Image (cartoon, rainbow, N blue to C red):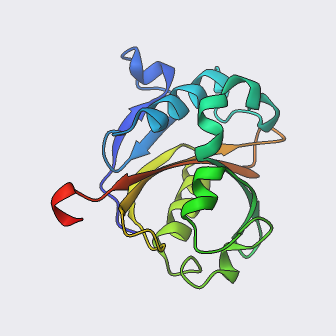
Amino acid sequence: MALRRSAIGSHEARNGDARGTRAFIEAAPNSEPVRLAVDHWHTIRGEAPIPLRRALDPVDIPALLPNSELIEVLGPPLDFRYRLIGDVIDRISRDYYVGKRVSEIPSQRPPSRIFDLYAETVRRGAPVCGTLPYVGDDRLIDHVEVVTMPLTEDGARVETLWGVVVPAETDQEVR
């Protein structure tokens, strides 16, 4: 997936210090939920390159839960399994994906933009944000803004992705 990337970053980058993990994005986050999610990821990360999975506590992010998903990183070969999907994502999806591997879903298996987004997040060990076309059945949704952020159990390997998905409605004139 060819994404145009710019850095929004770590606590260090925000304070003028370019050292440390940086989040690469297609464009600046447009939605408040995506901005809040990236900020929360940086908060739970602290000084570590990648936050621990156990640091992501649902009590701290109640407003983000309906738009959140947890994705298990599998492999080799690289694949992903949906472990938890929030109500907003479930409602706009074509099927019930909890427990399914991305490689089992025809519109998501490689080559696909969603698979590439997840793989890029694992490769970078940093949040990746972008806009993806919406491929579901809701005619009022044009695209989704998505951010995927890496989480670790051992402090080194990316074992889980936290995703936040925000549907964007079509323009009024298109309806």
Please state if 94 lies on the left or on the right of 57 as rendered.
Answer: left
Nearest the camera: 74 or 66?
Answer: 66
Nearest the camera: 61 or 92?
Answer: 92
Location of residue 154 with respect to 138 vertically, above or below: above
Query: Where is residue 87 drawn, in percent x and y?
Result: 65, 51
| Residue lying at the far left of the rendered structure | 173
Which residue: 54% across, 63% down?
A: 92
Which residue: 36% across, 63% down?
A: 140
Query: Where is residue 27 drawn, in percent x and y?
Result: 30, 45
Quadrant of the drawing holding the C terminus: bottom left
Please state if 154 lies on the left or on the right of 82 as rendered.
Answer: right
Q: Quarter-wise, where is residue 60 in the image?
A: top right
Query: Where is residue 135 drawn, in percent x and y?
Result: 45, 74
Quadrant of the drawing holding the N terminus: bottom left
Which residue: 60% across, 36% down?
A: 64
Location of residue 78 with respect to 43 vertically, above or below: below
Q: Quarter-wise, where is residue 51 in the image?
A: top right
| Residue lying at the far bottom of the rendered structure | 106
Query: Where is residue 107 drawn, in percent x and y?
Result: 54, 81
Please state if 166 lies on the left or on the right of 82 as rendered.
Answer: left
Nearest the camera: 113 or 15?
Answer: 113
Q: Please tell me how many numbered marks the rendered image carries.
A: 0
